[in-house]
Image (cartoon, rainbow, N blue to C red):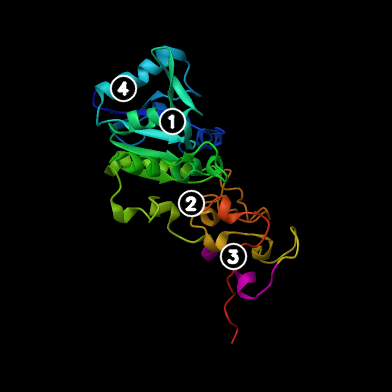
């Protein structure tokens, strides 16, 4: 690689996850994941993925040594990525990443260990940001998101929340590119939940293709009907993301466009306070026609 290109080391830890967030990101189209991992994402800078248990060829002690060496040699200069909720109950016994002295090291210890010396942390997906599905009631494993974990353990490393179940690949790639170009985001560039306003700054309800139906008070009675999907459980009125304008699957469609309604998967209340998914759970009124 050209000596003028600066490498930004990345350690990616996967905790209580279904791996869907990683799969979504691997499907990024422009740039492709090959571009992200091999080419300079921005001129003069290159992401160097040192550890991700799913996509790396290495395994076992050798793989963990690569991650630990990065933390030692690049202290304060590497990015930590985390996806999946972090189980904290019973001293983290419900999940481990690698071993030390022939004993498993809990996920919670790994996230703190790598997080405290990182330049910053990108929490990828709603499980890593807010606990998500693993933290749903009754949450027997005590899963939490990265930011909550850090606050409870006194870790001061900045956390950027890229929420979604899964997150759109553009949200992740755009966040990484922004960090490479401009450094960690300033507080005014994030919302109250630590999400980049560039992607999570507008209410889905404001840009929904079915908004006109809502304003007219025309609501679908069953899936497949024309009309606003609010009465069928759409959570667009309380969900902040750019899905209606960005679209998914290379710009083909999105949840409401396919007739399914928004599930609010980027929100900290997901899934507990936004369930049942196909039942109206909030009360808002269409504008008065008077």
Which quarter of the rendered picture does the C terminus lie within?
Answer: bottom right
Residue 171 in the magenta stretch? The answer is no
For disc 1, the marked residue is 91
Part of the protein shown in magenta: 205-219
- From the image, tell me which residue sits under label 4: 70
Would you say 120 lies left or right of 33 here?
left
Residue density around tag 2, few if under 14, some if 14–19, many if 20 or more, within 10 Å: many
Q: Are marks 2 and 1 in contact (CB under 8 Å)?
A: no
Q: Position of residue 53 (x, y in %)?
A: 47, 23
Residue under numbered circle 2? 268
Q: Residue furthest front?
A: 90
Q: SS of the residue at dot 3?
A: loop
Q: Is-magenta flag for residue 216? A: yes
Q: Which mark is residue 282?
A: 3
Disc 1 to disc 4, C-alpha distance: 26 Å
Q: Nearer the viewer, residue 106 or 176?
A: 106
Mark 2–mark 3 distance (CA, rounded to whole Å): 15 Å
């Amino acid at each position: 690689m050209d000596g003028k290109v600066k490498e930004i080391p990345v350690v990616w830890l996967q905790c209580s996850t279904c791996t869907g967030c990683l799969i979504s990101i691997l499907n990024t189209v422009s740039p492709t994941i090959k571009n992200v991992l091999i080419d300079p994402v921005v001129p003069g800078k290159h992401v160097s993925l040192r550890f991700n248990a799913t996509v790396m060829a290495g395994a076992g002690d050798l793989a963990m040594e690569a991650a630990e060496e990065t933390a030692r040699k690049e202290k304060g200069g590497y990015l930590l990525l985390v996806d999946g909720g972090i189980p904290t109950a019973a001293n983290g016994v419900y999940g481990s990443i690698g071993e030390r002295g022939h004993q498993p090291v809990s996920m919670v210890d790994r996230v703190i260990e790598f997080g405290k010396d990182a330049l910053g942390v990108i929490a990828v997906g709603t499980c890593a940001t807010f606990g998500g599905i693993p933290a749903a009631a009754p949450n027997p494993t005590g899963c939490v998101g990265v930011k909550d974990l850090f606050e409870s353990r006194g870790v001061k490393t900045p956390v950027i929340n890229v929420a979604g179940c899964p997150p759109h690949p553009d949200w992740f790639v755009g966040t990484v590119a922004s960090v490479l170009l401009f450094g960690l985001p300033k507080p005014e560039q994030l919302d109250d939940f630590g999400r980049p306003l560039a992607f999570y700054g507008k209410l889905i309800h404001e840009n929904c293709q079915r908004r006109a139906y809502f304003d007219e008070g025309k609501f679908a009675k069953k899936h497949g009907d024309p009309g606003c999907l609010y009465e069928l459980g759409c959570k667009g009125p309380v969900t902040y993301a750019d899905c209606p304008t960005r679209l998914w699957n290379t710009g083909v469609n999105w949840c409401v466009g396919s007739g399914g309604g928004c599930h609010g998967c980027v929100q900290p209340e997901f899934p507990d306070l936004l369930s049942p998914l196909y039942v109206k759970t909030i009360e808002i009124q269409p504008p008065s026609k008077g």
